[in-house]
Image (cartoon, grey):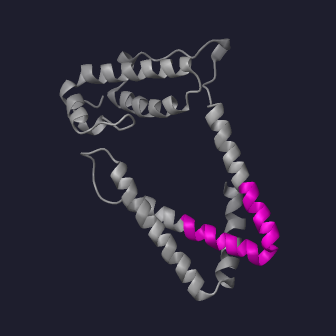
Amino acid sequence: MAVLIGPVSALAAIGALTLPGDVLFGWILLGAGAGILVAFGASRLRPRGMASGPDLPLGAATAAAFVTACLVLAGLLATVGGALTATVLVLLVAGGLGAGYRHRVAPPTAPEPHGGPVPRVPVTDMTTEDLCVGWRRSYFLLILATDEEARRRVVQRRQDFLDEIERRDRRGFLRWLDSGAKAGSDPSPYLTTRS
């Protein structure tokens, strides 16, 4: 990733120098609009009870990424022409789609020492914070499960997390449920025990 910083910066600078001022200003406005949409959209995805308001760092990062991508595109067009730029874009999109497909089809698995399965830590030995993190991560594992057996194991582990969280802090657990708990939401802000 660090290797790309130089070429991306150079192409963005070339793009900024070659674009007419009004086009550059328009792209900056579009980037700001995208940043605002993402910032306010992300705030709506947070569970109730958590800090409300726009996610300004995420919005700023989105705006910066949008403007940078536009400048790099303009820099590519100025340096290598339209045909090669189109080829690069097609390759990037195909590579991104291929990486997403490979990730969906074959999610990474944990290494198995000595050829056996990795032993699971019993939920009773986990901290409350680890239980909450495990609960949130297991949501994505459930989405990525490619067969019924994998899905069954993830569902069982999620049930174990919930049972242990409820056993440790029933009131906090019920506060989380009453807040409209979602399958991937974080129960930790509602719990009184964090260890």
Q: Is residue 83 magenta?
A: yes
Label the magenta part by its dominant secondary structure: helix
Can residue 49 be seen by looking at this rendering? Answer: yes
In the rendered image, which quarter is residue 90 located in?
Answer: bottom right
Q: Position of residue 175 (x, y in %)?
A: 20, 34
Find the magenta span and give its range.
65-92
Q: Quadrant of the C terminus?
A: top left
| Count of numbered circles in the view | 0
Identify which residue is drawn at 36% across, 49% down. 45
Quarter of the image with the N terminus is bottom right
Q: Position of residue 6 (x, y in %)?
A: 70, 66
Residue in front for this viewpoint, 73 or 10: 73
Q: Residue at x 76, y 78 (%)?
A: 78
Q: Is residue 134 positioned above or below 152 on the image?
A: below
From this viewpoint, is residue 10 visible?
Answer: no
Question: Quick one: 113 or 173, which is closer to the camera?
Answer: 173
**Up/down of 185 relative to 72, above or below:** above
Horizontal side, residue 105 vs residue 163: left or right:
right
| 146 sits to left or right of 99 | left
In the rendered image, residue 72 lying in the magenta stretch gets the answer yes
Residue at point 61% right, 26% down? 109
Residue 65, position as x, y percentages in the image: 56, 64
Within the image, what quadrant is residue 131 found in?
A: top left
Which residue is farthest front?
Answer: 148
Q: Residue 83's x, y, as percent?
A: 81, 69
Does residue 112 lie above or below 29 as drawn? above
Please state if 50 lies on the left or on the right of 84 as rendered.
left
- Tell me if residue 188 comes above or below residue 10 in the rendering: above
In the image, what residue occupies the spot 55% across and 76% down?
Answer: 27
